[in-house]
């Protein structure tokens, strides 16, 4: 039983022989001796190999040119070429003489692999369900968590949902407007620069008692500040969430100063009995630099997240997304 090879023998062989001859000639012209200094090329990072590059790799491999020289020729890292050979080479157990690397076949194999990763593009039912929940106000984390909690056969991670929302398909449908933060472009992790405000190490969230983490007792709060554009005056909104019951409190501030914020916060919390206001966990923002007033003022301890780690007080962060 004859099996057709993955290329047109009548045309591809003639074209391939011509390209191989040309590559060999170019190789001798550019590098006539191993002692010559090779040109320094810019390595392309984070971009998929194109069909043109895969054709060049095929020709140079057929010409027995070393992988390092292939990488230098197309401006790619050496590991990219090795990985490309390993993942996208053609293999036929019944006809091993056909085994090898072919540019067109490699391009097709890579395209199919990328399509398999795009779960929300392939699975129409899952995509419609995710988009419906996004429009109803669910966050990607909540959607992914609900699918896992219900034991659904088809699941999707929150990162896949974000990738779809900010990808070409999601941008064409303007799905980002349904996210809690409503950003048009996704902000990379750790993108904000440190403010340079240093809080005492003994006030770190890692020094916080273990029973606060396990939510065993009532009276442990998380606090944050929602600051709006200056064009909308100095007004801002402070938010507090009790960790055990998730009871939420929001109050308005008419001034951006940390002194005014702490005075308003103590005024809001003071009517509560002391066991109901044991501690508040903030992020390490400059707006909380007057935290030392809390202990002598209302007997409340203050703890602080690591710099650029607001997810360590996830309850109040989630509330802010909803409130905005």
Image: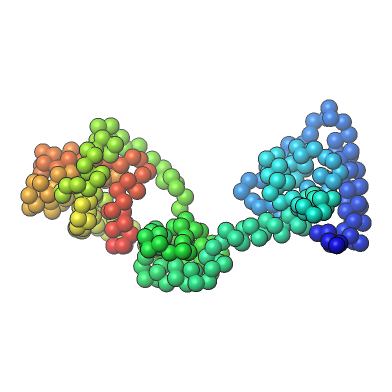
Tell me which residue sits at (41%, 68%) in the image: 134
Quick check: 146 left or right of 103?
A: left
The answer to whether any part of residue 136 appears in the image is yes
Q: In terms of depth relative to the viewer, which is nearer, 303 or 126?
A: 126
Furthest-top residue in view?
A: 35
The answer to whether any part of residue 26 appears in the image is no
Tell me which residue sits at (43%, 64%) in the image: 152
Please provide percent x and percent y for residue 212. Answer: 22, 43
Please provide percent x and percent y for residue 108. Answer: 71, 59
Furthest-front residue in view?
A: 1
Please provide percent x and percent y for residue 70. Answer: 77, 42
Q: In terms of depth relative to the viewer, which is nearer, 38 or 212?
A: 212
Quick check: 15 left or right of 304?
A: right
Please provide percent x and percent y for residue 114. Answer: 62, 58
Tell me which residue sits at (70%, 39%) in the image: 78
Quick check: 8 left or right of 196?
A: right
Vertical placement of 26 versus 37: above or below? below
Looking at the rendering, in which quadrant would you find the C terminus? bottom left
Q: In terms of depth relative to the viewer, which is nearer, 86 or 314?
A: 86
Looking at the rendering, in which quadrant would you find the N terminus? bottom right
Vertical placement of 37 versus 253: above or below? above
């Amino acid at each position: 039983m004859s099996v057709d090879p993955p290329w047109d023998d009548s045309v591809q062989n003639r074209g391939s022989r011509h390209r191989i001859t040309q590559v060999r000639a170019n190789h001798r012209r550019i590098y006539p001796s191993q002692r010559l200094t090779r040109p320094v090329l810019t390595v392309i990072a984070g971009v998929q190999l194109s069909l043109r590059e895969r054709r060049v790799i095929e020709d140079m491999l057929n010409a027995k040119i070393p992988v390092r020289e292939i990488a230098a020729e197309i401006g790619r890292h050496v590991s990219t070429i090795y990985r490309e050979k390993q993942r996208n080479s053609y293999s036929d157990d019944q006809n091993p003489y056909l085994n090898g690397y072919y540019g067109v076949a490699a391009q097709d194999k890579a395209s199919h692999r990328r399509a398999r990763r795009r779960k929300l593009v392939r699975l129409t039912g899952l995509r419609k369900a995710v988009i419906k929940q996004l429009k109803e106000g669910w966050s990607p984390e909540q959607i992914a968590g609900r699918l896992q909690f219900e034991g659904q056969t088809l699941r999707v991670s929150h990162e896949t949902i974000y990738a779809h929302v900010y990808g070409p398909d999601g941008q064409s449908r303007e799905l980002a407007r349904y996210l809690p933060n409503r950003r048009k472009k996704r902000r990379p992790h750790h993108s904000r620069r440190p403010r340079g405000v240093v809080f005492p190490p003994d006030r770190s969230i890692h020094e916080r008692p273990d029973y606060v983490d396990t939510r065993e007792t009532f009276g442990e709060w998380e606090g944050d500040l929602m600051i709006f554009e200056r064009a909308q005056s100095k007004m801002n909104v402070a938010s507090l969430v009790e960790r055990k019951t998730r009871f939420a409190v929001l109050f308005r501030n008419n001034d951006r100063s940390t002194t005014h914020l702490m005075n308003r916060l103590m005024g809001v919390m003071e009517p509560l009995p002391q066991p109901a206001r044991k501690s508040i966990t903030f992020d390490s923002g400059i707006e909380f630099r007057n935290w030392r007033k809390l202990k002598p003022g209302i007997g409340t301890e203050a703890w602080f997240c690591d710099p650029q780690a607001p997810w360590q007080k996830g309850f109040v962060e989630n509330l802010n997304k909803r409130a905005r």
